[in-house]
């Protein structure tokens, strides 16, 4: 899906799957909020979806997240994967994390129903470290980041199925992030209809944590 749905952003030298309030915020987050469209092939997306479906199907969609950040979701933490899926996750690790970063051993899997959404939030540093990387499956969506002190500074990421997004550093701590609900799901002038969306999220270990397990419910990434 590389290149699908790209929008021209005038004379700005940034790719069409990222748009923001101005050149300053685009430059500031150039390496902190990254989208790699077409990271997965259609076959790889199917591999992950097929492996996750039986486990997700055993769960009900929920509407009251423990920190009120998610609506219409089901989620799980998964540490055992097939050989094919492990190979995909190893590619994510190589693309998104530095050699010195240790990852949480469990991968966070978040399934949003078509009407589901993730509210603006800043992830707790208790649960994951400086970098998160998520694979988007099944449905396109729009992620919006807004500066916590200067709400006029914002960035939007177009997340097509098969894409990889990476948030690190300033994008994690100085900006809230959310997945827009269907009725608000626009990328500029383009309508981005929301369907069911699964995200597969790898997270670096929080600073000072000795175990690969967070020991608490995962953040809404």
Image (spheres, rainbow, N blue to C red):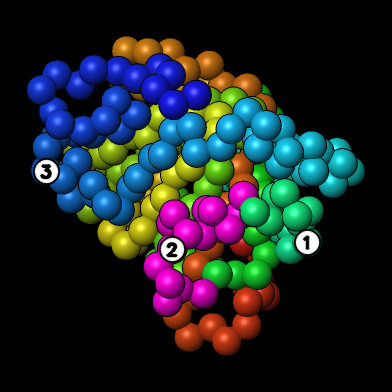
What residue is shown with label 1? 80
Name the mark on residue 97. 2
Residues 43 and 155: in front is 43
What residue is shown with label 3? 24
Residues 163 and 20: in front is 163
Instruction: Name which residue lies at 32% across and 12% down.
Output: 189
Instruction: Name which residue lies at 60% across and 42% down.
Output: 199
Determine the CA span between mark 1 and mark 3.
42 Å
Residues 183 and 127: in front is 127
> Is residue 76 depicted above or below 194 in this figure?
below
Q: Mark 2 and 1 residues: CB-CB less than 8 Å, in contact?
A: no
User: How many neighbours does mark 3 have within 10 angstroms: few (below 14), some (14-19), or many (20 or more)?
Assistant: few
Q: Is residue 112 visible?
A: no
Q: Is residue 111 visible?
A: yes
Residue 104 covered by magenta stretch: no
Determine the CA span between mark 3 and mark 2.
25 Å
Which tag is nearer the camera, tag 1 or tag 3?
A: 1
Determine the CA span between mark 2 and mark 1.
20 Å
Identify the element where label 3 is drawn.
Answer: helix
Where in the figure is residue 12, as x and y percent of width and height?
A: 13, 28
> Is residue 62 depicted above or below 205 in this figure?
above
Which tag is nearer the camera, tag 3 or tag 2?
A: 2
């Amino acid at each position: 899906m590389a290149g699908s749905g790209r929008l021209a952003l005038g004379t700005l030298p940034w790719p069409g799957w990222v748009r923001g309030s101005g050149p300053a915020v685009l430059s500031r987050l150039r390496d902190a909020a990254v989208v790699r469209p077409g990271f997965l092939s259609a076959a790889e997306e199917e591999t992950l979806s097929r492996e996750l479906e039986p486990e997700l199907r055993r769960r009900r969609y929920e509407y009251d997240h423990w920190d009120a950040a998610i609506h219409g979701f089901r989620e799980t933490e998964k540490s055992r994967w097939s050989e094919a899926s492990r190979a995909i996750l190893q590619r994510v690790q190589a693309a998104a994390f530095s050699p010195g970063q240790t990852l949480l051993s469990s991968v966070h899997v978040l399934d949003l129903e078509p009407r589901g959404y993730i509210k603006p939030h800043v992830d707790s540093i208790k649960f994951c470290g400086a970098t998160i990387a998520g694979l988007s499956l099944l449905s396109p969506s729009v992620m919006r980041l807004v500066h916590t002190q200067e709400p006029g500074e914002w960035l939007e990421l177009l997340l097509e199925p098969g894409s990889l997004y990476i948030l690190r550093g300033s994008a994690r701590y100085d900006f809230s992030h959310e997945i827009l609900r269907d009725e608000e799901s626009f990328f500029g002038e383009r309508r981005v209809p929301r369907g069911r969306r699964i995200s597969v999220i790898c997270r670096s270990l929080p600073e000072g944590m000795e175990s690969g397990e967070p020991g608490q419910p995962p953040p809404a990434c």
